[in-house]
Amino acid sequence: MSPHDSHSSFIQTPKQLIIAVLLSFLVPIIGIILLVKLVTSERTADPNGLTAEAVAQRIQPVGHVEFGGAGGGGAAGGRSGEEVVKSTCAACHQAGVAGAPKMGDNAQWAPRIKQGLQTLVQTAIKGKGAMPPKGGNTALSDDEVARGVVFMANQSGAKFKEPAAKAPAQKPAAAADGKKVFDSTCTACHSTGVAGSPKLGDQAAWAPRVKQGVDALVQSALKGKGAMPPKGGNASLSDADIRAAVEFMVSQSK
């Protein structure tokens, strides 16, 4: 190999020379076009990012205050006056914010106490001046507001009695179903007249018993008689269930 061969060019033919010349022009031009496009292009804004909800979510404060939350102390509707004051009223009445009578300041509370408890409670429920209804905690019941008012007033010279918590309304007991009791317990004997029991619908067998009166029949059924055990052997039945069953059997056997 001669020294000239070690320095030979990769362009060996006229065709290769033409290609090399074209590439030397095209590559820089393509690079410039791509660079200009990158610099001048605009980012497309998300259309959903400009809605009122999205904007409000971005600018909302980091934290917020909620009244009547789970930390209120007692069950809803049954919180004591002290619990109501600590969770709601103390925010203003502890320091006398916005003209609120400061708890423990007898001089400020005296003219209000003279108005009477009912007036104070109604004012607290409806709101007055800078105080919103129920102190801003609409989750409070009227009774809870009253207890809060009593607690603050009594800390400031009053001697009001705190309203007691109202017991939840009791649902009326369902009337006993005589036929249902008969079908579940009495039918074992009274459907066929087992062991001398009067058969349901047998007027002759029931006639002397009916003359005794329903009360006497109920007492016999409750205590048991002859082969019949107390309550027909079903101790889970209430006295009302037994009476209903006796009345059903009598009605079917007259």
Image (cartoon, rainbow, N blue to C red):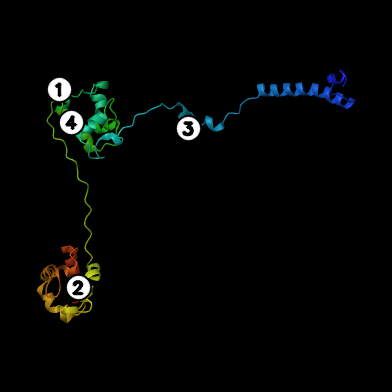
- Asked whether residue 138 is in view, the answer is no
Counting residues from the start of the chain, the first of labels 1 and 2 encountered is 1
User: Label 1 to label 2, Cα distance in Å?
Assistant: 72 Å
**Which residue is identified by label 2?**
249
Which residue, as the protein is rendered here, is positioned at the far bottom? 204
Question: What residue is at 11 percent from the left and 68 percent from the top?
Answer: 223
Which residue, as the protein is rendered here, is positioned at the far top? 3
Q: Of 54 and 190, which appears nearest the observer? A: 190
Q: Quadrant of the N terminus?
A: top right
Amino acid type shown at disc 2: Met
User: Label 2 to label 3, Cα distance in Å?
Assistant: 70 Å
Amino acid type shown at disc 3: Glu
Relative placement, left or right, of 56 versus 143 is right
In this picture, is 68 found above or below 240?
above
**Which residue is identified by label 3?**
53
Counting residues from the start of the chain, the first of labels 1 and 3 encountered is 3
Circle 1 Cα neighbour tier, 10 Å, few/some/many (<14 / 14–19 / ≥20): some
Q: Are marks 1 and 4 in contact (CB under 8 Å)?
A: no
**Which residue is identified by label 4?**
151
User: Label 1 to label 3, Cα distance in Å?
Assistant: 49 Å
Residue 177 picture quarter = bottom left
Counting residues from the start of the chain, the first of labels 4 and 3 encountered is 3
Q: Are marks 4 and 3 in contact (CB under 8 Å)?
A: no
Q: Nearer the viewer, mark 1 or mark 4?
A: 4
Q: Position of residue 242 (x, y in %)?
A: 17, 67
Q: Quadrant of the C terminus?
A: bottom left
**Which residue is identified by label 1?**
106
Q: Nearer the viewer, mark 1 or mark 2?
A: 2
Q: Which mark is residue 144?
A: none
